[in-house]
Amino acid sequence: MQFGLFGAAQAQRGGPDVDSAAGFKDYIEYVIEAEALGYQSAFIVEHHFTGFGQVSATLNLLTWIGARTRTLRLGTAVIVLPWHNPVLLAEQAATVDLLSGGRLDFGIGKGYRHNEFAGFRIAMEEAEPRFEEATDIITKAWTSNERFSFHGRYWQFDDIIVEPPTIQKPHPPFWQGAGHPESIRRVARRGHNLLLDQFASLEETGRRFTTYREAIVANGFRFDPAQVGVARAFYVVRNDAEKEAALDRRLAAQRRLHAISQRPDGNNTASIMAFSDTRAASEESALYGNPDEIARKLETLRDMGVEYVLLNGGGTSRENLRRFAKEIMPAFRTEPAMRAAG
Amino acid sequence: MQFGLFGAAQAQRGGPDVDSAAGFKDYIEYVIEAEALGYQSAFIVEHHFTGFGQVSATLNLLTWIGARTRTLRLGTAVIVLPWHNPVLLAEQAATVDLLSGGRLDFGIGKGYRHNEFAGFRIAMEEAEPRFEEATDIITKAWTSNERFSFHGRYWQFDDIIVEPPTIQKPHPPFWQGAGHPESIRRVARRGHNLLLDQFASLEETGRRFTTYREAIVANGFRFDPAQVGVARAFYVVRNDAEKEAALDRRLAAQRRLHAISQRPDGNNTASIMAFSDTRAASEESALYGNPDEIARKLETLRDMGVEYVLLNGGGTSRENLRRFAKEIMPAFRTEPAMRAAG
């Protein structure tokens, strides 16, 4: 198995007494240590207008991390395509790939938070067609060595060649989150890699993994388990009190994210996150426990074919990062193969 | 006086034998050495669809450079506002400022190359109003601690707060290029810093400097000569043959840039670069020569009040960089003061 990280840094806003950079710097040092401990990747979110400083310029933070690391894969989870001019985005992502020696994992999504659509004044109903069109343009931009024009519904470009070239060929792997079988099959039709969310049960995760594997093969692509990143919350505890406290923190964080994603009518159907709000469901899906408990869950995932787990510690606890690396990783980790391009 | 650099890296496109990253990496090592030699800043261009790999994602390259340096100011010269969603751009630039500890110099322009406007399908006639509107939005985004809405002609946003906060307060300095007196006065009305181009004669540069100083004061701002960056080509030569060769290279490069900026009708009125295409004019404006010749020109600039010179070597010659730093800089350099926010 391989282990990566996914999560977010936060930049606090405040007066002269607040060091707004502290949250970003702490996160950067966290992933630098993670690389040294054997973690393979860091996937970072993109969000806007949160009021509590979630990362907005994801590719800039990843660029900085790229300059401070040597082997860590630099992932986005996910860049929300409807916000971006797809050609500028292709240039920015290619620059990160070029500077990092081909370490970009380009996770993309169509967005799900009402307040972000409202802020950018983009209709939520356009999320899907905007996503599809932007994906087409970015793919074309990265693979065309000749000038081309593109006249879409939302974007038009004439006689352009997109620079710089990416290092990874034909292009950096695309990653997409999906849960419903039909969504998973759509990801497989493009040959993109798959991100599975941290909230689904182990059993449901196994079903989704199988759906993707079958669909990838049915579409004529070679299947590599490294193309599926399974997100899981993780916390290596010393006792039951630590476990209960971690569960409490997780449920509170879930409630906050649920609230911020909400539409005014309370009906947020576009969320890509399955939301499991019972404590039992949260405990089942999360890798919270002592090393033996966590190992048993990882064995279950491995038995289903999963070989790539993306861990979210709900913060930047170095102790948690080190415990997992030293007490759990050695029994599961295999040397990384070349990641398949999606 | 203070000395910075301005210029561009290039990422060559090609087959498997071409290391496309080589040009960027060479430029990065060049500015890292420049920092060690006492240069204070690196200003980088933004261009698109050139076919020869000019920097497109300027803030990403600057982010990487920021992570590899400690004191170097990170300048854009210039980000072309009409291409960008101003809120995404404000987030990206703020992230660079935050991560670098407040080292961003935010140079902005309205664009002048026909093929870029054509590629993005933006009417050149909209360059000016788009520039003004984007500048207003970015300034608001950086200075508002409360949610706000903006309903402009080209961009609309509802109930947004732009994150992360910048480190520099009230915001990173804006820099603008200008040459005509009325354009210079417009820059001064906003209180922005001024970039003067490398092609104007010393005498004309002095007139423009004076126009800006008077206009800044007339608008109620404090004048600091560090707010004016005077661009100059530089090449420290050992003999006349080296000087002639450098002049030949410069004229060829000017012709290439002139051609790429051109409109199909041959009438590119929007260029921000004065174009001096005679060898004599080129020789007068450029800091090409032995250390004594260059020192005399710097003395002329200093006598006019100029205290900040942005040098362009037309490439990344380390020898040139070192010669200037060791043989010319010591007689002129003063310790940098805190740069005034524009």
Image: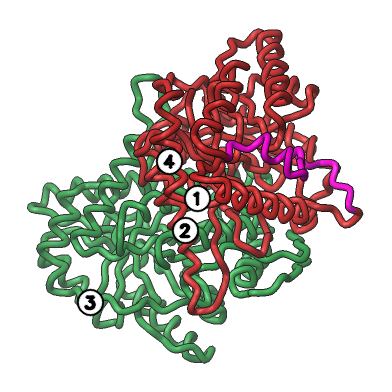
Chain colours: A red, B green
Q: Which residue is mark 2?
A: B96
Range of residues picked out in magenta: A266-288
Q: Position of residue B106 (x, y in %)?
A: 48, 64
**Position above or below: A46 against B158:** above
Tell me which amino acid carries mark 3: Glu
**Helix, strand or loop at mark 1:** helix
Q: Quadrant of the N terminus of chain B?
A: bottom left
Give me the disc on residue B335.
3
Q: In this picture, is B79 found above or below B3? A: above
What chain is tagged by disc 3?
B
Distance, label 2 to label 4, CA atoms, is: 33 Å
Frontmost of labels 1 and 4 is 4
**Which residue is outermost to the right?**
A265
- Label 4 CA crowd tier, 10 Å (few <14, some 14–19, many 20+): some
- Going from the N terminus, do you reach mark 1 or mark 4 first? 1
Tell which tag, 3 or 1, sits nearer the viewer: 1
Looking at the image, which residue is at 55% across and 34% down? A310
Q: Is residue B187 above or below residue A274?
A: below
| Label 4 residue SS | helix
Q: Are marks 1 and 4 in contact (CB under 8 Å)?
A: no
Mark 2 or mark 4: which is in front? 4
Residue name at image x 76 percent, y 68 percent: B149
Could you confirm whether marks 1 and 4 are on the same chain?
A: yes
Q: Label 2 is found on which chain of the structure?
A: B
